[in-house]
Amino acid sequence: MLEPMRTTPDRADVLAERVSKAFIVDDRRTQALIGLDFQIQAGQFVSIIGPSGCGKSTLLRLVGGLLAVDGGRITVGGRSPQEGRRAKHFGLVPQTPALLPWRTVKENLTLLPRLNHGQGSRVMDDERIDELLVAVGLARFADSLPAELSGGMQQRVSLARALALRPPILLMDEPFAALDEITRASMRFLLLELWRDTPATVMFVTHSIEEAVLLSDRVLVLSSRPGRLAAEIVIEIDRPRRHGIEDADSFHHHAALVRASLDRATIGADPAGAS
Ligand SMILES: Nc1ncnc2c1ncn2[C@@H]1O[C@H](COP(=O)(O)OP(=O)(O)OP(=O)(O)O)[C@@H](O)[C@H]1O
Ligand SMILES: [Mg+2]
């Protein structure tokens, strides 16, 4: 039976209340997250920063409905993450692009929407694909295979794919970490431009303080494992943010705030992460 057509919102809020998650492997229990509380308003750009292994990727997977919480609750636009996932609420940009190697750039973009057809979600037309390819500067490479593209170009395809269906929530897990510094800098500004036209709520995991400050409305700092919310920094820098903003005093001021919070969050941590 066909599901009734549902209208998908442009953006949705994310609410986490006392969220906990542990992994048990061979009787060994790893508490990844504990008692995590936060709220992200619809349309906000929020970065998540914290030491390695503190549960950032786990958090994105919980919000995206790929994992279930053990304790507490997450809602996305008032629904459970699993319902949100069925309603195609999420665009995911993983750390490595994970494109289908035997499909062209254009096919990599169309395949996902085709799978969605008939499930009550929006279907992407040729016009949208062309628009996205232009937006990420790859119009000339529509018929190329991923192996013919550089790492940065592949990551731009991945970004376009995540945005294809205009998801209300964009989940990005260190998407630019594998890129060289110059490509990475231009990807940050490209993302800001795309986000201005696609008003999604963004959760962006990064290890870079500068990246978090440049992109975000707010930065959530997680403690060492088990990850909890250690600090929250509001980035009061006007938008649009352009090249060169990294040299401004207000930028340095915010970066120093994030760095100090991150240092505090990491000091005194149990390095074994035992729980
Ligand atoms: N599927 C899993 N099975 C068992 N343990 C897991 C699983 N996924 C994550 N963990 C553990 O949970 C903890 C948090 O992992 P997670 O990948 O969320 O950290 P992270 O903050 O994203 O780290 P990084 O910055 O290195 O990417 C780690 O101790 C990890 O070993
Ligand atoms: Mg991770």
Image (cartoon, rainbow, N blue to C red):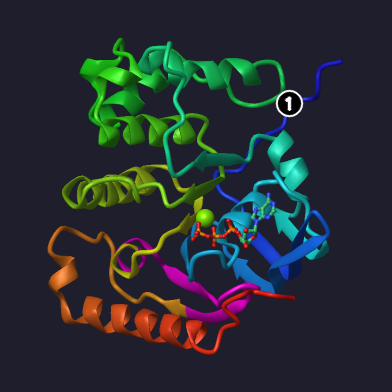
Along the line of sight, which residue is nearer the eye, 139 or 6? 139
- Using residue 226 as the reference point, say whether residue 243 is left or right of it: left
Q: Which residue is mark 1?
A: 5
Question: As drawn, is 142 to the left or to the right of 16?
Answer: left
User: How many badges with numbers are in the image?
Assistant: 1
- The residue depicted at 45 percent of the width and 48 percent of the height is 199
Q: Is residue 66 visible?
A: yes
Q: Dividing the picture into quarters, in which one does residue 249 lie? A: bottom left
Q: Is residue 184 left or right of residue 243?
A: right
Residue visible at 33% across and 14% down?
145
Q: At which x and y percent is residue 127?
A: 38, 17
Instruction: Answer above or below: position of 94 versus 158.
Output: below
Residue type for callout 1 = Met
x, y (%) of residue 187?
A: 27, 46
Callout 1 environment at 10 Å: few (<14), some (14 to 19), or many (20+)? Answer: few
218 in magenta = yes
Q: Decide if residue 111 is on the left or right side of residue 135.
A: right
Residue at 56 percent across and 83 percent down: it is 269
State the residue lying farthest toward the right.
Answer: 1
**Is 60 contained in the magenta span?**
no
Rendering coords of residue 193 (x, y %): 29, 46
Residue found at x 55% / y 64%: 53
Ligand 1 falls in quadrant = bottom right
Which segment is the magenta one? 212-232
Vertical order, 147 against 161 (above or below): above
Tell me where residue 48 appears, x and y as whole percent.
Answer: 49, 65
